[in-house]
Image (cartoon, rainbow, N blue to C red):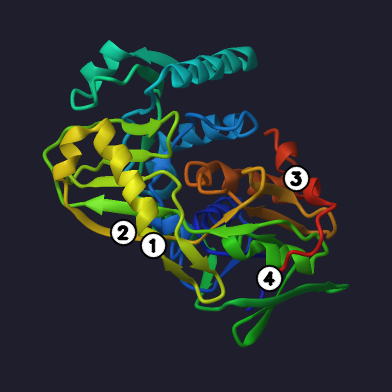
Amino acid sequence: MDADIIVIGGGLHGSSTALHLARAGADVLVLEKNYAGRHASGVNAGGVRTLRRHPAEIPLALASRELWCRIGELVDDDCGFEQHGQVCVAETDADVESARERLALMAELGHSHETWIDAAELRAMIPSIAPTVRGGVIARGDGAADPYRTTFAFRRKAGALGARFLEGVPVHGVRRDAAGWHVQAGDGVHRARIVVNCAGAWADRIAAQWGEPVPLLPIAPMMLVTTPMDHFLTPVVLCQGRPLSFKQRANGTVLIGGGRRAWVDRDEEWTELDFRSLAEGARTVCELFPHMSAAVVNRGWAGIEAAMPDELPVIGPSSRQENAFHAFGFSAHGFELGPIVGQIMAALISKGGTDFPIAPFSIGRFATVGDTNR
């Protein structure tokens, strides 16, 4: 099956790219080795977070949040999006100082989406939080959505606009000649003028075939979910000094994450939970929310994602090949960026550029890296 543009990877960023390209009238084929949302895109915490972003990501995150606020117009589904805020709590003097430094940096950069919330207001907002918490930094416009529902909504809408999806077809090789790109996937070869690498934790293997190896690390962030509890929490809670992402969903279950990692083998697509690390996370939860000591954990899981050494994604054109583009390496915080990354990729391909500042995400920053293909 041939197309003008082939997108490798049908996760959120691949499906978003396909959607925005299809909206522009492009002929798009998406190749996915499993099914859309099988790994990172469908099993993350669903955070729609501008809070605590690296400064380079903030323009993209704020623009993407605007798209989230009207996500139904884009994909005909509200994706379970709720704009209830996210707050990063400070427990110690050192945490407060770090928070103040962060806010000073935001002010220097001209951003006002993060503000300080004092202890009294925080406890009024979250009465069950430990009384020792000193306050925090809040992004009131942030929220969360359902990750698998979101990924499937993007895939479905892209398909409705004419994009084609082939699932269960792993890509084995990508080469270019005078006739264009040849992508070997499954038992066939697919031809295209343009190729987009949205292959997630496997994207470095595509990049290496294009002569631009990158130091990608496959990771598997762990998540826990409890049985339903009485409502006690509206915003998402992060922690300044300890790894934590904590939210209560509409059905009463509590989702606990924060970047703690499972063991992972990406070749076997296998993960194993690290229960010692999960226990440390549970202690953090109980210290911040004492009543959680009575919570019952229902299940845990981990999805395979791609992390970069600087925790910034790779977004933009190939540095070595014509008509080739990358969007990968979101380092466990790419879900919120999904809508805007697709828009950026479509602009790069159809218009030859974007108004967003994507230079910090160039694959060229790894130009001196040796071949790390594993």
Identify the residue at image location x=57%, y=18%. Answer: 106
The amino acid on which the numbered mark 2 sits, given as a three-letter code, is Gly
Q: Which corner quadrant holds the C terminus?
A: bottom right
Q: Name the residue tied to disc 3.
A: 362
- Give the answer, above or below, for where 126 lies relative to 215: above
The amino acid on which the numbered mark 3 sits, given as a three-letter code, is Ser
Q: Are marks 1 and 2 in contact (CB under 8 Å)?
A: yes
Q: Residue 76's x, y, as percent?
A: 37, 49
Q: Name the residue tied to disc 2.
A: 300
Q: Name the residue tied to disc 1.
A: 273
142 left or right of 182 in image? left
Residue 268 visible (yes or no): yes
| Residue neighbourhood size for the residue with mark 1, other residues' Cα within 10 Å, grouped as few (<14), some (14–19), many (≥20) | some
Which of disc 3 and disc 4 is earlier in sequence?
A: 3
Which of disc 2 and disc 3 is earlier in sequence?
A: 2
Query: What SS does tag 3 mark?
Result: loop
Q: Name the residue tied to disc 4.
A: 374
Give the CA distance from mark 4 to mark 2.
28 Å
Hey, which quadrant is residue 74 in on the image?
top left
Give the CA distance from mark 1 to mark 2.
8 Å
Which mark is drawn over residue 159? Answer: none
319 left or right of 219 in image? right
- Give the answer, above or below, for where 55 lies relative to 262: above
Identify the residue at image location x=39%, y=57%. Answer: 43
